[in-house]
Amino acid sequence: MIELVRPATADAEKPYVTRLRVTAGVLDPTDTVLIDGDDEGGLFSGPFGIVAIEGILPEQLEGEVVLVDPARRRIERLLRTESTTNTLLVTERCDQLCVMCSQPPKKTHVDRFDLLEQACLLAPAGMLIGISGGEPTLYKERLLTLMERTLSTRPDLGFHVLTNGQHFTEADIQRLGAPEYRRVSWGIPLYSADPALHDLLVGKQGAFSQLEGGLAHLAMAGARIELRTVVMNDNVNGLPALAGYVSSRLRFIEAWSIMQLEHVGFAKNRWPALFFDHSRRFARIGEALDRALLNGVRAQLFNFPRCTVPPEYRSLAIASISDWKRKFAPACSDCREQTKCSGFFEWHPDEEARVTVRPL
Ligand code: SF4
């Protein structure tokens, strides 16, 4: 697992965002540059002062955009040059309480939009930046402003926003239809075609109906949408019906991602009740995939180790888990498909992963 937070001491009074530079080359005046380092960390100097970062080889920080937090004596590695899956957490507040939530919400919100916008402006060229929460659109104006300012200054960047999709209104259609929003995609969860079951799984009455409204407004804006469905015991039998709903009512989406559960957050303690073992019974998932694909919906499988998926669907199981939270079982080193495989989340039980894999 790659550690995204590292201990650090800085002489600044307030948090700030900067880009770290280790190697010689063209520097930007806002860069913070290595002046001394060894295997255990580095001393950097920049326009905001000195920062000593511990517990990491300085070379691993080259070009990274970090948030330095002097009071908490740490840095957050916000945007890593080597990663294709950098995600900014904009709030921990949420208006749902999903049964499987991987990041249980908090009641308080710490507004860091200004700092995160500075990070986006310093992003490496061509980066797709993830935005998540909590529910980012609880702060919709701040969120849209951050993205618009970034995209207008940096035409090389894009965003992928995870949202429950319920807070878009008619008033947003024109704004979200602006050309820069072609570089924004929205990842939106939908767990069932049955409104009562969807509402139950997300812990919010009326969520399905609000989501239908939000999706309609996004569709009218021409927004790019990726639907996301986590498979659980409660909704697996309804997947074919959901495929029918997506195929008939939501043809405007770009992709439908069927996702396996993460062994973390609320799901950790509810694992026996929630986890559906697709490696033993794939029929319902297969039926849903067939129905979607036949109707021209681009369906894909996230967080499904490839060897656990029947061969005819294996090409849909993509390497979806972010590098910093992905692991493989020891036997995976003999597998020819490891580079195409999601592997397992770092927090997945080792023993379960070990007995699951069948190197291809
Ligand atoms: S053996 Fe490991 S790398 Fe190969 S498909 Fe299975 S989980 Fe993926």
Image (tube, rainbow, N blue to C red):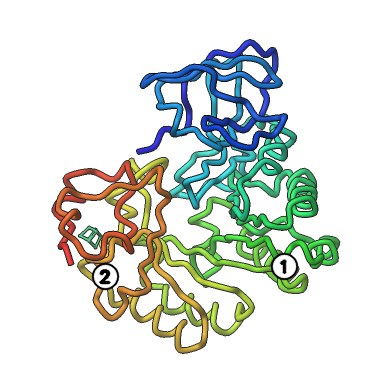
| Of the pair 267 and 63, the residue shown nearer to us | 63
In the image, 164 versus 236, the foreground residue is 164
In the image, 143 versus 334, the foreground residue is 334
Name the residue that disc number 2 marks: 309
Picture coordinates of residue 333 (x, y %)? 18, 53
User: Residue 34's spot in the image, x, y percent?
Assistant: 54, 23
- Say if residue 163 shows up in the picture: no
Q: Quadrant of the C terminus?
A: bottom left
> Which residue type carries mark 1?
Leu
User: In the rendered image of this protein, does residue 301 appear above or below residue 76?
Assistant: below
* Mark 1 crowd level (few <14, some 14–19, many ≥20, 10 Å Cα): many
Picture residue at 50% right of the left edge, 71% below the top: 256
Where does the image place residue 273, in percent across and percent down from the top left? 31, 52
183, 301: nearer the viewer: 183
- Tags 2 and 1 in contact by the CB under 8 Å rule? no
Question: How many labels were placed on the picture?
Answer: 2
Q: Taking the image as four quarters, which one is ligand 1 found in?
A: bottom left
Decide if residue 333 is in sight here: yes
Mark 1 lies on a secondary structure that is helix
Q: Taking 186 as reference, is 272 above or below it?
A: above
Single out the residue that lies furthest toward the front. 25
Q: Which residue is mark 1?
A: 218
Location of residue 11 in the rendering, given as x and y in whole percent from the top left corner: 63, 10
